[in-house]
Image (tube, rainbow, N blue to C red):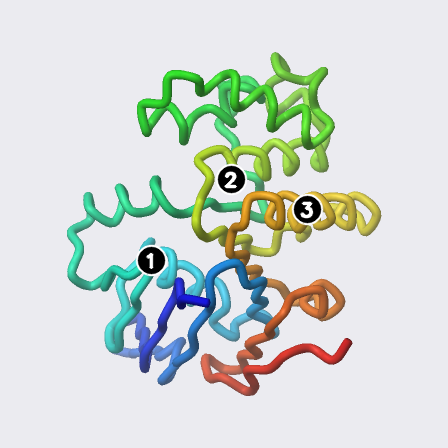
Amino acid sequence: MAKILNVHHLEKTYSSGSKKLTVLHDISFDIEERETFAIVGPSGSGKTTLLGLCAGLDRPDGGKIELCGTNLSSLTEDERAVLRNRNIGFVFQDFQLLPTLTALENVAVPLELQGAKNALQISRKLLEKVGLGDRFDHYPSQLSGGEQQRVAVARAFSNRPSILFADEPTGNLDAETGEKVIELLFELNKEHGTTLVIVTHDLELAQKTQKILRLKGGRILENSTPAV
């Protein structure tokens, strides 16, 4: 299998007044195409910062990230945005749906940005797949948390991404709803042949993936395959 993400000696430091805080220290790992991968660790361990760097949402202070065969450091802000829209799907803890758009319109946004002519048709099929075929015209405020996250999952897969980053995807959901959303995420991921990277503090969820990267204090504690 080819590598879809290569991370080499990554460093990230934030400045606060005269103080500097290094949140990631010498992080190196790689992820293969179609692999399911979890990044785990306590709050403040650098998980979300690492995800943002890997997805090209922010720039590292040291090291190199290659995503889909491209060195992210060599790209301008606009070029990174194009790469994200073509190759990356996102699912966030707080859903990040656009409140003024219906469920159908939210799912269609990435496709419309790509200029797809059949954006609404694809979006309808995806919403049906996640069990929301009767919610096309509902706005986020008219949906439960679980329904909003299912819309977000459908949106994440709408542009057929090569890699999907999920940041605490069940963080705002009760256990039962969260379990259903995760089943859906893994099911669609397998069906679409996507690489799935999940940031979570939930070890039970992490155990469902093929590889686990454990962080503590911005350093790698372990990079392993879960025991089945």
Q: Where residue 187 is drawn, which disc sits there?
A: 3
Position above or below: 136 against 32: above
From mark 3 to mark 1, how far is it between C-alphas?
22 Å
Location of residue 146 by image quarter:
top right
- For the residue pair 105 and 16, the one nearer the viewer reads as 105
Mark 2 to mark 1 CA distance (whole Å): 17 Å
Where in the figure is residue 28, as x and y percent of width and height?
39, 80
**Picture disc at residue 156:** 2
Residue density around tag 3, few if under 14, some if 14–19, many if 20 or more, within 10 Å: few
Q: Nearer the viewer, mark 2 or mark 3?
A: 3
User: Along the horizontal axis of the image, is 45 left or right of 138?
Assistant: left
Which residue matches tag 1?
68
Q: In the visual, does 122 lie left or right of 24?
A: right
* Dot 3 or dot 1, earlier in sequence: 1
User: What is the secondary structure assignment of the residue under circle 2?
Assistant: helix
How many numbered dots are placed on residues in this image?
3
Q: Is residue 210 above or below residue 185?
A: below
The picture quadrant where one finds residue 10 is: bottom left
Is 69 left or right of 76, judged from the image as shown? right
- Name the residue: 50% across, 68% down: 47
